[in-house]
Image (cartoon, rainbow, N blue to C red):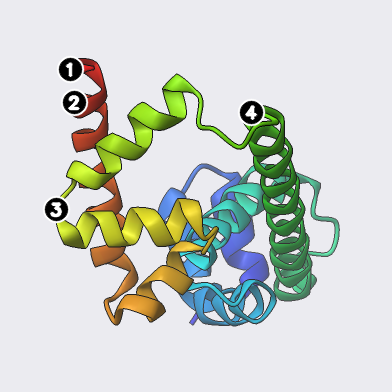
Amino acid sequence: MQADCELIEAVLEGQKEAFAELVSRYERPVRAITLNILSDHHSMEDVVQDTFIAAYKNLPMLRNRNAFGTWLMKIAYRCSLDWLNRRQKTNLLEINSAAADEPPDGQLNEDNEALLSAVIKLPEVERQVITLRYFSSYSVGEVAQAVGRNIGTVTKQLSRAHKRLKKILKEF
């Protein structure tokens, strides 16, 4: 088994399969750190990927090749925190946008009314996941837990619902 520093040198010399070995060695601890911070398997997958991409891009800047594991865990930690910050900013923008769109008389505007009508036309399963995800502001992981399905299934249902909604809204 090659040492991390040997694999890093091989990667820097252009041997991409050496980086695959590093990913294989450190994937579980990176997943553990990101899942601990994010508490969402779907988001964790994205952040784990971001972590390894950042590590690959910044590998030439790593001074102490023997400290690769520690360095990688710091990247995973920072990527997780960055993801949380982006998510919070997105949620604030959605809340502010929704508040700005809400008319003072409590009536729905034409666009919101069309969207609500389109959501009602969705099959029950898709309507359920769309409602939980966007009207109740649940994360994909929380939707999956609420409906008792795995995250991949919920993601696929959301994707299908988005396509149906686009089709329905084009008809309006």
The residue where tag 3 is placed is 123
Does residue 41 appear anywhere in the picture? Answer: yes
The residue where tag 4 is placed is 101
Q: Pointer 1: residues within 10 angstroms few (<14), some, or many (20+)?
A: few
Q: Nearer the viewer, mark 4 or mark 2?
A: 4
- Give the CA distance from mark 2 to mark 3: 14 Å
The residue where tag 1 is placed is 171
- Secondary structure beneath label 2: helix
Quick one: which residue is furthest to the left in this view?
A: 123
- Image mark for residue 158: none
Q: Are circles 1 and 4 on residues that touch, CB within 8 Å?
A: no
**Residue 166 x %, y %:** 26, 27
- Give the CA distance from mark 1 to mark 2: 7 Å
The residue where tag 2 is placed is 167
- The answer to which of marks 3 and 4 sits earlier in the sequence is 4
Residue 70 placement: quadrant = bottom right
**Residue 47 x %, y %:** 58, 59
- Secondary structure beneath label 3: loop
**Residue 93 x %, y %:** 71, 38
Does residue 162 appear anywhere in the picture? Answer: no
| Relative height, residue 14 to residue 66 (above, below) | above
Q: Nearer the viewer, mark 1 or mark 2?
A: 1
Camera-side residue of 9 and 80: 80
Residue 4 placement: quadrant = bottom right
Q: Are circles 1 and 2 on residues that touch, CB within 8 Å?
A: yes
Q: What amino acid type should be assigned to the residue bearing mark 3?
A: Pro
Q: What amino acid type should be assigned to the residue bearing mark 1?
A: Glu
